[in-house]
Amino acid sequence: MITVTEATATAGALERLSDEGVSIWLDDLSRRRIESGNLAGLVATRNVVGVTTNPSIFQAAIGSGAGYEEQLADLAVRGVTVDEAVRMMTTADVRAAADVLRPVYGASGGRDGRVSIEVDPRLAHDTAATVAEARQLAWLVDRPNVMIKIPATKAGLPAITEVIGAGISVNVTLIFSLERYREVMDAYLAGLERARAAGLDVRGIHSVASFFVSRVDSEIDKRLTLLGTDEALALKGRAALANARLAYEAYEQVFDGGRWQALEGAGANRQRPLWASTGVKDPAYKDTLYVDELVAPGTVNTMPEATLNAVADHGDVRGDTVTGGYDRARADLAAVERLGIAYDEVVRQLEDEGVAKFEVAWQDLLDAVTKSLDSKGVDAE
């Protein structure tokens, strides 16, 4: 647990980040974190105003079994399927976290205090199933501050429009490319227009667009290292920031446009860019790189706890580090392309890998829960 002394000594960088218009969300959740008071402590002392989850996070939390024994025993007695068991455990955690964040939700007018839960990743390429799952998750969690995570696959785009159109707030995940990001924003605006046409109050609908950062450097840096030239090596660690900065430029363009103005007049909320995958993968880079260098108003940065603590300890928050860097960002990506590293191919690969990784994590979770239910004498099939 965080002590008052620790909070006083290290809150400066996090407070400055919040003051710059960046909402700090925690990229992690577990029952132990909730029940121990750790999550409430992070909200109270670390400027945390939201929580994101994904299949990998739940696989790590529930797969360990810590804190889930009683519910697993009850589920075993009921003889539920493994899919139902997982759904009951994950939605229970999100519901409890949403209750912890409810005061933040109220104080921010619904902007923050959000907890995200992702649709079953096996549905990523099925629009109708994604919509049905999103509706089910929103109903099961039954909290106004839940956000349903939908992947930005081709099948996910119309699902985003339909779910937003139904008045359900959405966290769009697994965005890697600038083209796909523009499609995501278009899907959001289309959903708001549909909701408005249906007579829904668009003021209550919120969304974030999770633009992934570190994985871009991981893939492009690997290719730059293989090239091995001085020019190639000098570009390492620059592509991810360039990509994210140009995403923010696209955000500014869309949400200054005429289509948005009509919705804003009806009280609609901007779909904020959310920097995801902000834990540094390369130990050669500063561990706060993807926080310090992506400070811009109206954004969200969701961090694993190690990154959150690093920012609190030695983050270098020095104002907006995004909006003045668009020309440099374009030059950096162009330089990578000139070396024969195709941007479109990289981001397509990262999207495919992202979906696949979440599917593997989900299957691992199902396997772990199956084993737990079987150990209690229940057929989980």
Image (cartoon, rainbow, N blue to C red):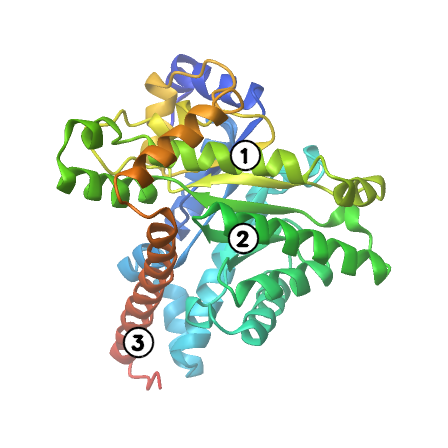
- Give the residue drawn at x 78%, y 59%: 195
Quick check: can you spot residue 49?
Answer: no
Q: Are marks 1 and 2 in contact (CB under 8 Å)?
A: no
| Residue 303: % across, % down | 40, 37
Pointer 3 residue = 370
Relative height, residue 91 to residue 146 (above, below): below
Q: Secondary structure at mark 3?
A: helix
Circle nearer the viewer, 1 or 2? 1
Left or right, 336 with reference to 103? left
For label 2, the crowd category at 10 Å Cα-Cα, with few meaning under 14, some 14 to 19 and many 20 or more, is many
Number of the label disc, if any, that sits on residue 172:
2
Q: 10 Å neighbourhood of mark 3: few (<14), some, or many (≥20)?
A: many
Observer-side mark, 3 or 1, equals 1
Tag 2 or tag 1, which sits nearer the N-term? 2
Q: For this rendering, which residue is in front, 216 or 24?
A: 216
Depicted 354 relative to depicted 337: above or below: below
Amino acid at pointer 1: Tyr
Q: Nearer the viewer, residue 253 or 185?
A: 253
The x, y position of residue 269, in whole percent, is: 72, 42
Three-letter amino acid code at the position of disc 2: Val
- In front of the other: 60 or 229: 229
